[in-house]
Every structure is written in C-alpha cells, then in structure tokens.
Image (cartoon, coloured by chain):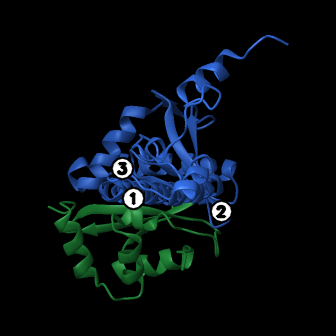
Amino acid sequence: MKLIASDGWAIQKKLGAEVDNSARRHILVKFWHNGVMVIQFGIRRGSGELGHGHIPNDMKISQRECKEFRKCNISVDQYIEILKSKNLIA
Amino acid sequence: MNQRNPQLELTESSWPSRRSGAKWDLMECDRPTAVFKNPFSSRCAGSRRSKNVFSSDWANLVPSLIEKLVSEVVEKKKMELRFSLMESAVSELKSQLNVLAASNTRIVPIASFAPEPYEILKPILVSVQSVEGEFEAGWFDANIHTTGENEEEAVSNLKSLILDYFDSFSKEPIEKLGIEPKRQFAVIKTFIAKKA
C-alpha cells in the first residue's frame, strides 16, 4: 500500500497539525508539541492519488510505523514517545 | 626421414625397451607411482594375463590408493560446492543490478533557484529515483523529499519545497523550532541565502 495525498491529510488530521497554505506548490503540514514545531511535511497541491512515500521520512518514522499510525494502530501519544526515544522531542 | 622427435626419444628411454630385449614385468607395473595407474591398462594387461602374478606388497598399496581416491573425491565435492556458491552469488548480484536498473537513481545538482530571489551558496546535490511509476526527489542532508510524475517535475517540486521550508523556518523564532526543524534550517542556510 503506497501512501498518497489522502493519507497525508488523514495523518495531518490525526496529529491535529497546522496547515500552512502560504507555500508554493505544496501545502505544509506542521506538527507542534508544547509550543515547538517538531516536524513538517509537504503535500503537493492537486496531487490526488499520486504517491507521498516520503511522509515517513518527514515524520522520522519507518514506513511500517507510518502505516500503523495511519491505520490507528499507533496513537499520537505513542508517536510522540517514538520521537522522544529518538531524541527528536526534548 | 631420419629426423627423430627428441620428446619421443625421451619418453621411450624412460620405458623398458622391448627392442633392447628387456621384458616388462608386473613389478614394473605395480611399482607405486605419483599418478594412479589403471591396473587393466593395455601395457600391464598383457603381462598380467601371461603370468597372473602380483607383487608381494600390492595389498599394502590399497589403503594409500583408497586414501588418495577419497581425497580426490573430497576435493571435487569442494569444487562443486564453490561453484554452486558462486552461482548463487552471481544470481544475487544479477537481481540487485536489475533492481538498480529499475529504480534508475540519479544524482542531480541544483545550481539555481531563478527567478526566485534566493542565491545558492554551493550546489545542492539531490537524488531522483523512480518509485512505482512516479519519481521521488530528495535532499537527504536536509531531509526534504517530494514526488513528481517525471524527473524534471520531481526536481522542480523539490526546489519549490526547499524554499517553502526555508521561508517556513525563517518566519519562526529559533526557540520555536524543534530539534529536527532546527537541524534542517541550519543545513538549508549553509546552501541558500535570500537575496537582499
């Protein structure tokens, strides 16, 4: 299962991430935690069913973890714990 | 016609000569040699039939011959094993080459953001690869990636996204950037600067 734009939007919604429409060809999704921007990724405008396989890289997790997060087998709190274990959240 | 082959002469001289009257005996045939001799070879067979006598120590030679035979078989099996390992290694390499050829990864330099008002301080090397019929472009140092329907579009989208990241980070106070955004911004700033 490849990740597409709609997966990106589902992830944005689940994270409760900010949507920045001021960018050029992409819409930037910014995830803030405790007032600090932790990660951000771009979703191409009008990309429909085109692949967004880079989202796991942007989220600093593996493809498998990203798909599990998308399927709700990993919660936001668990995702934050993963980032903490990688020293990406202080 | 009187010319003689010196190699043939040498070989003949090392054999007991029939012309000189010496007889071949079983002792000659059965003498242990470096190379295993077929006991039914024509040279020995004649004398064996005629006398049917074996050298007294023939039984002593059997274990060493068996040992030699076993070691030759072991060597052959080792060679077969080596060949089959090499075969599987070659086939593995072939499949890896096919994957590389299919992914068609290329490194592309970004040398300009014109007409955008940004200057490049040093060339940015990005990778472009085919993924499931699309193209993914990425700048690994800054962990920025995007896709496109062809190579040119993927790189063009990446250039646009790099500037979006630059602008996005630039408008936040540095203390609002987390560990990864701070690192990404630091990398980007070593390659890009906004024109005054």
In the image, taking residue B146 as reference, residue B72 lies left or right, namely: left
Q: What secondary structure is marked by label 2? A: strand
Which circle's residue, 2 or 1, is located before the other in the chain? 1
Q: Give the labeled residue for mark 1.
A: B74
Q: Amino acid at mark 1?
A: Val
* A36 versus B32 height, above or below: below
Tell me the green chain. A
Q: Using the image as rendered, state which of residue B22 and residue B157 is in the foreground.
A: B22
Q: Position of residue B7 (x, y in %)?
A: 64, 20
* B97 versus A58 height, above or below: above
Mark 2 vs mark 3, foreground winner is 2
Q: Amino acid at mark 3?
A: Phe
Q: Residue furthest left?
A: A90
* B86 versus A27 height, above or below: above
Residue B134: which numbered mark, if any?
Answer: 2
Q: Using the image as rendered, state which of residue B95 and residue A63 is in the foreground.
A: B95
Q: Give the labeled residue for mark 3.
A: B169
**What residue is rendered at 37% in x and 73% in y?**
A17
Tell me if residue A4 can be seen. Answer: yes
Q: Amino acid at mark 2?
A: Glu
**What residue is rendered at 58% in x and 49% in y?**
B105
Q: Quadrant of the N terminus of chain B?
A: top right
